Image (cartoon, grey):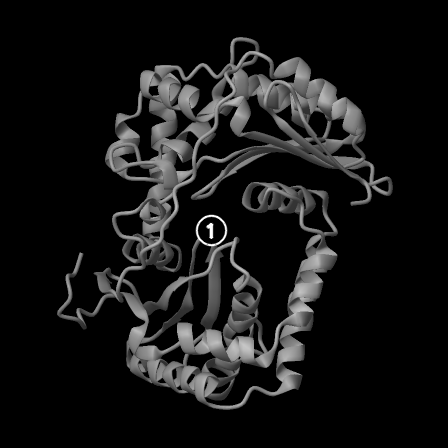
Amino acid sequence: MQNINITNTENGVRVISEYLPYVKSFSLGFWFRNGSRVENKSNNGISHFLEHMVFKGTHKRSSRRIAEEIESVGGYLNAFTSKENTCFYGRGLAQHFGRTFSVLADILQDPLFRENDIKKEAGVVIDELYDIRDNPDDLIFDVFEEKLFKGRGLGNSIIGKEENIRNFNSERLHNYFNNNYKNGDLVIVASGLVEHDKLVSLTERYFNKRKITTISNKSYKNYIAKTEFMLNKEIQQVHCILGKQGYGYKSEKRIPQLLLSNLLGEGSSSRLFQAVREKSGITYQIHTFVNTFSDISSLGIYFSTSESYFDKVLEVIKRETDKLICKEIKEKELNRVKEFAKGTLVMSLEGTTNRMIRMGSSILNHRRIIPPEEVIKRIDSVRIQDIKELAEEHLEYSKLSKIVISSNKRSNKKVA
């Protein structure tokens, strides 16, 4: 692909760069195939906690110096953890690329994990956990996947459990870090005004001491049955997800699945938005979602409404999903959804950070960079019959799992 270069270095790191001559900045990401999926009950949350802790200091740099060294030249450092990957990244002006690389390499080669810092950061992360618990529109997605993937790694929340967070210590963090963040599992991705040879040279300079080993990704072959769960909380509205398991990144059905989701509930012109909000006026929030993982996904419909309208919203959703299964889909509607998906993709590529994230995700999930043109071609090739078949598979109302957060104990199911 034009302007994209990939090098597998001798120290086990895969290096990818995209040269964009029309910008004056860059985005640089250090990706590890590690997240809450590989955790267990006793250490759930450790990947996210470690993401926080690497910024707390090394033998060369204090936490303040880490921040000031980048921000003093107009740059930015951050990180995020997902269920399958962790990315530590920086943005800045092109002339400060080497400085940003040096700082990121330092925190990922030599984090101190001091006990005092761990105790303080535990308080910060627990406060983040409480914030999620206080926001039902965030909490319900954690509960949904916990129940949908019960007993499996994808059921682990990213932030983890409070008890675990309070029990993390320096020894546990060092052991987990040394076992799970290694050269053979590291992908370095940069997009912007970046010279590939310089990126390779910096990688070989800074990453030459760690063992070259990799972590195997688990795969799920067995689906679980429908589940229903209600969480009782003192809140004003009812929050609900109806959904099930779907296809992951590796499936050819991923793109048709995305278009089905868009058609049903993504955007103001989608069927559910029009039927539930615009025509009925019985909810403010309603949309579909697809959370895609390497080999599987969670997909569903989320809404919030008042107690008095809850059953009515469910009726409208059932009516709309039944129509999608049983009645004809117009070519005009499918074309609208395709253009929406293509527009979303193309507009997301206007920033270097989104481009860097897309390349990192693509190389980890597909072992290659998938060009946007290929994705657009796949979108254009989706037929009405493809959507109908997926609707029959995914949207039969009686087979959807249901998660509800409400102040009203409306179910005989377990109330937590």
For the question of whether residue 169 can be seen, the reply is: yes
- Above or below, 365 against 264 in this view is above
Q: Residue at x 61, y 77 (%)?
A: 383
The quadrant of the image that shows the N terminus is top right
Query: From this viewpoint, which residue is outermost toward the top?
Result: 59
Q: Is residue 145 left or right of residue 21?
A: left
Q: Is residue 240 left or right of residue 371?
A: left
Mark 1 lies on a secondary structure that is loop
- Give the residue number, with chain letter if any, for mark 1: 293
For the question of whether residue 237 can be seen, the reply is: no
Q: Is residue 153 left or right of residue 376?
A: left
The image shows residue 262 at horizontal and vertical percentages of 55, 71
- Count of marks, rendered view: 1
Foreground pick, 356 / 23: 356
The image shows residue 10 at horizontal and vertical percentages of 64, 19
Q: Residue at x 45, y 82 (%)?
A: 276
Q: Residue at x 80, y 29 (%)?
A: 195
Foreground pick, 314 / 226: 226
Q: Residue at x 23, y 60 (%)?
A: 231
Query: From this viewpoint, which residue is outermost toward the bottom?
Result: 327
